[in-house]
Structure formats: C-alpha cells, structure tokens
Amino acid sequence: MNQQQKLIRRAAEELVKAKRVAAFTGAGISVESGIPPFRGENGIWNKYNPRFLEIEYFEAYPKICWENIIKMFYDSIATAKPNPAHDVLAWMEKGGLAGFEAVITQNIDNLHNKAGSEVVWEFHGNSQRVICMNCGEQNDADKIDLTKLPPRCGKCKGILKPDFVFFGEAIPIEAGERSFWLAENVDVMLVIGTTGEVMPANMIPFVAKRTGALIIEINTAESIFSEKITDIFLQGKATDIMLELKQILSLNSLAQEKN
Ligand code: NAD
C-alpha cells in the first residue's frame, strides 16, 4: 500500500468513526463536469473581469453583466452533468456513510441537487434560479428568455438577476446559519476543491477546526486550508479520491454486515 492509499484508508476510518460529517465544496468539485473554476489554469478570472459579479456594477450595467455572466457560467452549466464526486456525496447521504448530514457548497451550478443530494446548503445561491430586483419574484432560469438582455420580470418588468450571491451581497440567511451550525457541530469536515479565497465562506472549515472537527481535504493543489488546518490532505482529482473512498467505505459496511 503506498502513502496515498494509506492516507485514504485513514480518512475512511475517520469518516466511519464520526457521528456527524459534512462536506464543504468549491468550484474544483465541478471541474471534471466541465465547469471552469475561478482561479488557476482555464480559470474564469483569466478571461473575465470580476466586476461583472459586483452587485453595484450589475445594478448600473445589467446588460453587459448578463452578457458576460452567460458566457462565464450559463453556457457551461447548461450542459454539465454531476460527476462521480457529486455522486459519491449523494451516496454517502443516502446511507453509504452513517454520519453524513449535509453538503455545504459555494458552488452555484446545482450539480449536488442533480446528483441526488437532498440536504444541500447553497452558501452562494444557485444560478439555476433568477430573482426580480424589483419585486423579489423567483423563477427557474431555464424558463427565462435570455436572448433579450437584461431579462425582465413577467410580473413587474423589473430587471432579473441570477439568484446567486454577487460580491457585495449578503449570504442567504438560512444557508449561512445552517452552514455555521454544522461547522460547529461536525466531527469531520470533508473540504473538496476550494482555494479558500472567498470570504466569509472560507471561515466555515476554520470554525469546524476550532470547535474540534477533523479536516479532510481533497484538492489537486494546496489551498489556504492545507497548511493551517487540514489534518488529512488527499491530493488528487475529486472524482478519483471520492471513488477510492467509496470503495473502502463499501467494503467496510460489507464487513460490518458479516459481523
Ligand atoms: P476556486 O476557483 O478559487 O478554486 C478551485 C479549487 O479547486 C482550487 O483549489 C483547485 O486546486 C481545485 N481543483 C481544481 N480542479 C480540481 C479537481 N479536479 N479536483 C479537486 N480539486 C480541484 O474555487 P472556490 O474556492 O470554490 O472559489 C469560490 C467561488 O467560486 C465561489 O464563490 C463559487 O460560487 C465560485 N465558482 C463556482 C463555480 C461552480 O458553481 N461550479 C465555478 C466557478 C466559480
């Protein structure tokens, strides 16, 4: 057994022992579904100005923001399917891992829901909904005509905004509260595919660590968390590592059934 296999086995043992587990995911978990992350090679920030995601800029220039946001997110998310890493998290929740409680995600791509995860706290909202900036009416993004920009509310003709959190906007209250409650109460937090650059989401693993949780991190590269709080760093693609974890967890539950 090589070093990486030993680490994955240790991570699996900790996951099995834990009474309460939550996953905290970032853009990296969806890279293998074809959605580019913000940072790194092929990252969105290499091509687009972050201003398009600032709420004040959107309020002033909704048309140009929408044009760019469609290219940044909607084009890739429209065709994206959950990958095995999303699937394994859904499997854990459905009984693959007894203590698994929830996914907290920074992602806005809806892929955890599509994979079948039921308890998903969307810390930054969801691009598959739009919200009227005037009357607050929400709608599914795929019911909106995006050929004429900016799209307008069917009820009051107000400007529609993607229902994800722009820079300068507040975190959705319930998702924020639930995420920090979980952070304070989990025994293990599985941190997958995030640089930890975005505040205040990046506080979640730090709170978990401070309140006694073990941090298992899966990432192709080191992050803000790796040096400071990660207990077990599993370097690699989210799909590969999650499938290996699933294999060990499945064998473990078979062994328990036999005993
Ligand atoms: P980020 O772009 O800052 O970093 C991506 C991270 O994923 C990096 O640490 C990278 O090393 C890692 N990574 C890349 N490929 C990976 C793989 N195959 N397996 C595992 N890890 C991999 O992303 P972030 O930290 O999540 O940034 C937060 C912001 O990005 C959030 O606000 C989120 O809304 C936004 N975002 C979301 C999406 C999405 O919904 N899919 C896409 C782009 C950006």
Image (cartoon, rainbow, N blue to C red):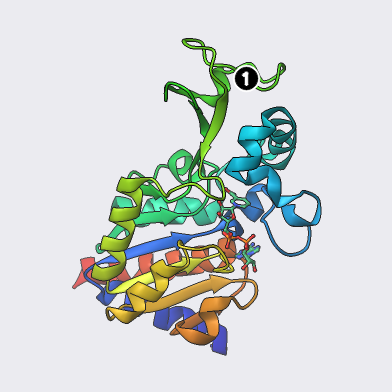
The residue drawn where x is 29% and y is 54% is: 177
Specify the farthest residue to the right: 47
**Left or right, residue 215 beside residue 39:** left
Q: Which residue is mark 1?
A: 151
Q: Quadrant of residue 21?
A: bottom left
Figure disc tally: 1
The residue drawn where x is 35% and y is 53% is: 176
Front-most of 115 and 247? 115
The residue drawn where x is 26% and y is 73% is: 18
**Which amino acid is tagged 1?**
Pro
The residue drawn where x is 51% and y is 10% is: 154
**Left or right, residue 107 beside residue 98:** right
Q: Is residue 194 above or below residue 187?
A: above
Q: Secondary structure at mark 1?
A: loop
**At which x and y percent is residue 91?**
38, 52
Q: Quadrant of residue 37?
A: bottom right
Q: Is residue 68 above or below residue 233?
A: above
**Left or right, residue 242 beside residue 54:** left
Regarding residue 17, the answer to whether it shows in the image is: yes
Specify the farthest residue to the left: 259
Regarding residue 254, the answer to whether it shows in the image is: no
Ligand 1 resides in the quarter of the picture at bottom right
**At which x and y percent is residue 39?**
70, 62
| Mark 1 residue's CB less than 8 Å from ligand 1 | no
Front-most of 249 and 127? 127
